[in-house]
Image: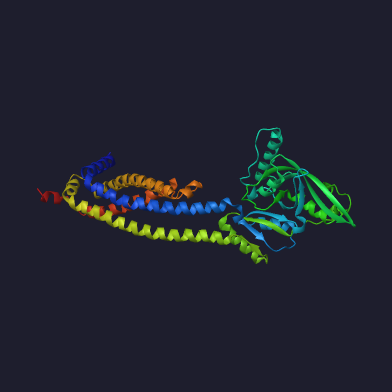
């Protein structure tokens, strides 16, 4: 009851001195609103740039430009690194090409064939054809297989995912069937292996810009063994050396970092192993540099503004205490302790902060809408020009409350020195 009475008295005092209260609220709003807008711009712009980088999985890719000879243990060891997101071995470049035949008029020669598996960044955001037609059941199976591949298992052995360019030139979509043809020369004779595949999906155009097909690693391995002169049952080849004598070796690997922050460390690790690499590390560093620059600018402005706000509010509270010195002395005479005087001023600070925060957020939303309208091109692309999260708003309120409470404590220190006898001297 005592605390409630002190809080109620503090609120009534604020209402009684409405003009002074309005000035103190304006002081807080003058700091809160600009800082929210400035931080919203920083967070919105940097987040938009980071999201743009993350949307393109090629920014996470680290290309191995030099070839070598690696076993599965080496691939597994690289994949276990905490900064690695996706790693899969690749066969020699000469064995990663095949011809694809859809119809007599729709075929594509020397298409790049790449391995894929669960967790492949390129499979994220794949759009499948879901039109209800005669192939609905086949497409549903293909989509189910693709979702399973993205979650836990590899692609079906006879499944293929095409890049947008390859799918367009072959005129295929999810659920279609086509043939893959591989040629070799064995014992002076030209041979061909033809395998029927089902199109599981088509990658978005920006995911992979060249004509390419993504298949299960085992299929790519069989392609290499077939070209190397082995008898591969899955290719229908009975001539050649027994496939049991073949060794699984990889010339390179498809390597993707866990996130943007992990690209540099993973790239340095591969370079340290004597592997020539290529990545988009420069673009990632540019975004980080912009983020660091904006953070520094924001911090300097924020510290300056908060320092000025503390000084202004502390001055206001001290002036208020001096103006109401007799009233505070009367309260002390009535039994209000120094601690309760501190609660009195802290309650006023909390009330002022709550009102100022609401007004500051209102100004922020109006300013944010103005910025988004001004930068209409950015907004049209689905990005935020000025944006803060609820967590940012909560943190801003806590900081503003801390500033107001600090100022109120300075005022309370002066109020505690007022003696009850001062009220008697005025009689």
* x and y, in percent, of residue 364 in the image: 38, 47
Task: Check the picture and name the quadrant holding the N terminus.
Answer: top left
Give the quadrant of residue 97: bottom right
Q: Is residue 342 visible?
A: no
* x and y, in percent, of residue 152 in the image: 67, 44
Please determine whether, in this image, residue 359 is positioned above or below residue 246. Answer: above
Q: Is residue 6 left or right of residue 387?
A: left
Write the residue at 34% across / 44% down: 358
Q: How many marks?
A: 0
Write the residue at 43% across / 53% down: 41
Write the residue at 80% across / 49% down: 181
Please determine whether, in this image, residue 302 is positioned above or below residue 216. Answer: below
Q: How is the image coloured?
A: rainbow
Q: Is residue 353 visible?
A: yes
* x and y, in percent, of residue 222 in the image: 79, 51
* Residue, far left: 427
Q: Is residue 257 left or right of residue 321?
A: right
Q: Is 206 in front, or is 389? A: 206
Q: Is 183 in front, or is 114? A: 183
* x and y, in percent, of residue 383 in the image: 49, 48
Q: Is residue 53 left or right of residue 391?
A: right
* Residue, far front: 105
Q: Is 161 in front, or is 134? A: 134
């Amino acid at each position: 009851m005592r605390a409630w009475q002190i809080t109620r008295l503090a609120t009534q005092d604020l209402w009684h001195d409405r003009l002074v209260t309005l000035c103190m609220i304006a002081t807080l709003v003058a700091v809160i609103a600009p800082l929210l807008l400035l931080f919203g711009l920083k967070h919105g712009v940097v987040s938009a740039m980071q999201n743009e980088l993350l949307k393109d999985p090629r920014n996470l890719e680290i290309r191995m430009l030099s070839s070598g000879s690696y076993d599965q243990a080496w691939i597994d060891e690289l994949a276990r690194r905490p900064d690695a997101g996706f790693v899969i071995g690749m066969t020699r470049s000469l064995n990663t090409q095949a011809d694809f035949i859809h119809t007599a008029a729709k075929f594509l020669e020397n298409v790049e064939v790449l391995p894929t598996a669960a967790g492949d960044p390129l499979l994220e955001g794949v759009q499948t054809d879901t039109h209800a037609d005669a192939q609905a059941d086949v497409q549903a199976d293909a989509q189910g297989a693709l979702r399973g591949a993205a979650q836990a298992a590899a692609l079906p052995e006879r499944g293929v995912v095409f890049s947008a360019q390859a799918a367009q030139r072959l005129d295929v979509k999810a659920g279609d069937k086509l043939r893959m043809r591989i040629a070799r020369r064995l014992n002076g004779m030209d041979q061909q292996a033809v395998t029927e595949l089902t199109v599981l999906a088509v990658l978005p155009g920006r995911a992979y810009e060249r004509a390419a097909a993504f298949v299960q690693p085992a299929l790519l391995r069989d392609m290499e063994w077939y070209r190397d002169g082995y008898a591969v049952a899955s290719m229908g080849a009975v001539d050649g050396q027994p496939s049991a004598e073949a060794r699984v070796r990889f010339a390179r690997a498809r390597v993707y970092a866990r996130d943007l922050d992990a690209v540099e460390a993973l790239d340095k690790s591969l370079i340290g192993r004597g592997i020539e690499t290529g990545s988009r590390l420069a673009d990632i560093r540019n975004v980080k540099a912009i983020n660091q620059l904006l953070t520094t600018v924001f911090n300097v402005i924020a510290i300056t503004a908060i320092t000025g706000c503390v000084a202004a509010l502390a001055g206001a509270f001290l002036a208020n205490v001096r103006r109401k010195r007799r009233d505070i002395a009367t309260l002390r005479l009535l039994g209000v302790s120094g601690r309760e005087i501190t609660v009195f001023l802290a309650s006023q600070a909390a009330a002022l902060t709550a009102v100022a925060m609401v007004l500051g957020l209102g100004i922020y939303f109006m300013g944010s809408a103005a910025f988004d309208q001004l930068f209409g091109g950015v907004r049209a692309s689905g990005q935020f020009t000025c944006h803060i999260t609820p967590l940012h708003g909560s943190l801003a309120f806590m900081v503003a409350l801390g500033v107001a409470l600090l100022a109120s404590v300075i005022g309370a220190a002066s109020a505690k020195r007022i003696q009850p006898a001062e009220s008697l001297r005025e009689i």
